[in-house]
Amino acid sequence: MRRLLITGFDPFGGGTVNPSWEAVKSLPDRVGEWELCKLAIPTVFGTAAELVLKRAEEFRPEVILCVGLAGGRDAVTPERIAVNIRDARIPDNAGYQPCGEFVVPGGPAAYFSTVPVTEMARAIRDAGIPAAVSNTAGTFVCNDVLYTILNRYAGTEVRAGFIHVPRLPEQGEPNLPLEKTVAALIAAIKVL
């Protein structure tokens, strides 16, 4: 059995639910050859990534896959790139709103995801769910987490990636029902 650490965020920006965690916690404990360790993380710069790294040290996964909400998107989007910048249009859940600071001072400008984003997007579409590769994880906490993890595991065999998911129907348009978001994550996991 291979090990996958998969994470989702708590609600943020005044929301009462976050589809990323709702989908992650709804996943089965095993998907194909993968044993899943599910982790809820706070929408807080620095803290979220620290919790992922701490759990990864304990669980020792082969792959870390983080999931987050991209409210304006109408498709499930595996992220290709994480950039070394924190620039928030709204405060995180601790009230912090960085403007143009580095995730890792002195770190590379960007990292490419180390999971097969094109194949993941194709597998999700093949499951009948809208999907596309995204070339920006933004500059909020989602990007912060992905960049930090890729920086930590650069040059190792541990692979890492990020998937953004749309809102739930009760959160407005565009959206994707929870069961479709769960099916999309399962399809993506199967091609890791």
Image: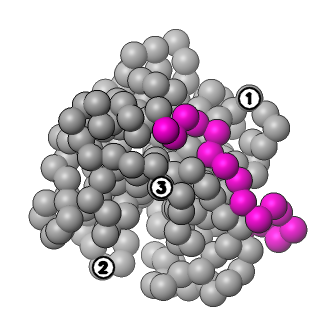
The span shown in magenta is 103-118
* Residue to which mark 2 is pinned: 14
Q: Is residue 1 shown left or right of residue 54?
A: left
Q: Earlier in the sequence, mark 2 or mark 3?
A: 2
Q: Which amino acid does label 2 sit on?
A: Gly
| SS at badge 1 | loop
* Residue to which mark 3 is pinned: 134
Q: How crowded is mark 2: few (under 14 residues within 10 Å), some or many (20 or more)?
A: few
Q: Main secondary structure of the magenta part?
A: loop
* Mark 2 vs mark 3: in front: 3
Q: Is residue 93 shown left or right of residue 167?
A: right
| SS at badge 3 | loop
Residue drawn at (46%, 25%) of the image: 191
Residue drawn at (66%, 64%) of the image: 83
Marker count (numbered): 3
Task: Provide residue 73's location: percent of width, then percent of height.
Answer: 32, 63
Rounded to the nearest whole Å, what is the CA distance between mark 3 and mark 1?
A: 23 Å
Tell me, yes or no, whether the highlighted magenta stretch contains residue 135: no
56 or 169, which is in the foreground? 169
